Image: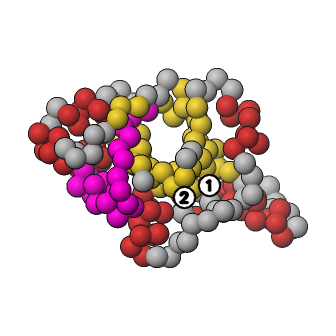
Amino acid sequence: MNILLIQRDGTDLHHTLFSSETSRMALRFYHPQKRPCGVSITCATLGSALSLVKELRWYIRRYVREPLFEFQKGIYFTHQLAQDVYYERTAILGPGWKYRKLYSFKNGKIISSVPMSPKSTPEEYHQEYIGTDSSIEIWCTEDDVEEGELLAEEAEDTGTAVPDE
């Protein structure tokens, strides 16, 4: 289980975490790795990853755009979905997860966040890759997906039209 802490613009998160004795002590067994978009931390389990994020919550609120949890190589999920899976047990992750987004990065910054339609693949969004260094798929809760996009997709599934407003 890896945690990816996406830093806010103008922040060197790795430097910030290691310039504070409190965060250095919390991270002393984890050996965080600096990434262009922030910091990657390897944990043994989802429970330990959630615990570490909770321990670092002061730094996360101030310096992190979003903490993500790696489900599979190249597929991450949001903090809310991680909590739903681990604590609430209301979500069961598996192939074909319905609520997803695609984050595209350039020079370590998120330049686009695109809601993905159900059963699509990241390769289908090749226009979003233009001018980017990398992209990652994010699994999220229904609340994290833009509502307008979701309504349009549901209308396609049922065969009913959504009127333009």
Q: Residue flagged by tag 1: what amino acid is it?
A: Arg
Disc sitting over residue 140 in the figure: 2
Identify the mark nearer the N-term, 2 or 1.
1
Return the residue found at the far right. 159
- Based on the displayed image, in which of its 4 quarters is residue 156 positioned? bottom right
**Residue 53 spot, x, y in % from top left:** 30, 54
Within the magenta stretch, is there residue 38? yes
Q: Is residue 90 above or below residue 161?
A: below
Where residue 63 sits in the image (x, y, percent)?
30, 39
First to last magenta residue range: 37-57
**Which of the two residues, 112 or 55, is positioned nearer the viewer here?**
55
Q: Residue at x 42, y 76 (%)?
A: 88
Q: Which of the image's four quarters has the C terminus?
A: bottom right
Residue 138 place in picture, x, y as percent? 56, 50
Q: Residue furthest left?
A: 21
Judging by the rendered image, the residue that carries numbered circle 1 is 100
Secondary-structure class at tag 1? strand
Snapshot quadrant of residue 45: bottom left
Above or below, 129 against 145 in this view is: above
Residue type beneath disc 2: Cys
Is 16 situated left or right of 149 in this image? left
Query: Which of 31 and 34 lies nearest the eye of the viewer?
Result: 31
Could you tell me which residue is drawn at 82 percent across and 66 percent down? 157
Give the label on residue 157, or none.
none
Asked if the stretch drawn in magenta spans residue 32, the answer is: no
Are the residues flagged by discs 2 and 1 in contact, CB closer than 8 Å?
Answer: yes
Q: Residue at x 55, y 71 (%)?
A: 92
Q: How many marks?
A: 2
